[in-house]
Image (spheres, rainbow, N blue to C red):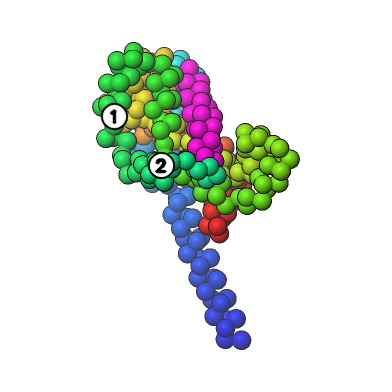
Amino acid sequence: MSNSVGRSFADRLILGAVIALAILWIAPLVWVFALSFKPNEFLAQRTDVLISPPFTLKNYADILGTSAVFRWTVNSVIVAGLQTLLMLAIASLAGYGFARTEFRGKNVLFVLVLAGLAVPEQAVIVPLHAMFADLELHNTYSALVLPRLATPFGVFLMTQYFKAIPRDIEEAALLDNASRLKIFFRVVLPLTLPAQATLGIFTVLHAWNDYLWPVISASKPEMYTLTLGLASTQTNFSQSEGIGYLMAQAVFAGLPVFILYLFFQKYIVAAASGMATR
């Protein structure tokens, strides 16, 4: 009896801690969302009133009234989409190669790939800028997409997931004279859908919210991504006179990836739980 009571108390304690952490995580989002519907003149005086009037849609109307905002949105969709597709293809092929094939120097090469996780992106900004400037690729989709494909996390994630798949499945296909590529695309790859969904979500989030590289590579307004474009519309006094507009920008830029996460969250949970138990 005492053990069951103790477990019940521990479960309630854990549940309470989870709820408290969830509130701490959600509270800033609710605050941003609520302030986005407040007039800027009102927020210049106080920002602690969330659910009481006045309310306005002017902040969102000002965003949609920016003539280039839809072009920036299209740019973000193209960049995020290309990065995600190419990242999934590269990481899946590389991960399968590291997990299932044997070649000279494989372990050394894998260690070098993982070493890239320790290199901050700011450390390679100058060489990247010089390289793409020499190639005259700045202000192109290639410049916005290609540098972000060299991300070791995707290769590591897919490698570990492929290693967790039993080899018996592939051996059965090999007995039927299936080629390695056929086994990869028709047998093994469909089993990695949770890991691919997780990697895809992370890639989309990073590409959609990326600011550092686009602000360096995209100098023409027509090539701005949504994050960079919305930032360029802020005035020098936006922090004191346009708080509602800033909050509306945050909601407008973050809503698409939030909706995307809601659709694919079950795959992310499946991948995370699968990696934790293997």
- Return the x and y of residue 70 as percentages of the image width and height: 50, 19
Disc 2 + disc 1, Cβ < 8 Å: no
Q: Which mark is residue 105?
A: 2
- In the rendered image, which quarter contains the C terminus? bottom right
Say which residue appears at 40% left-offset and 33% top-offset.
150
Badge 1 amino acid: Ile
Q: Earlier in the sequence, mark 2 or mark 1?
A: 2
- In the rendered image, which quarter contains the N terminus? bottom right
Q: Nearer the viewer, residue 223 or 181?
A: 181
- Return the x and y of residue 65 as percentages of the image width and height: 47, 18
Q: Nearer the viewer, residue 152 or 218?
A: 152
Q: Is residue 201 visible?
A: no
- Residue 236: image quadrant is top left
**Extent of the magenta region:** 71-97
Q: CA distance from mark 2 to mark 1?
A: 29 Å
The secondary structure that most of the magenta stretch takes on is: helix
Say which residue appears at 31% left-offset and 25% top-offset.
128
Residue linked to disc 1 = 125
- Return the x and y of residue 230 as percentages of the image width and height: 40, 25
- Return the x and y of residue 139 as percentages of the image width and height: 38, 16
Disc 2: CA contacts within 10 A as few (<14), some (14-19) or many (>=20): few
In the figure, 106 relative to 270: above or below? Answer: above
The outermost residue toward the bottom is 1
Say which residue appears at 60% left-offset and 43% top-offset.
192
- Residue 92: image quadrant is top right
SS at circle 1: helix
Asked if residue 89 is among those painted magenta in the image, a careful observer would answer yes
- 153 on left or right of 256: left
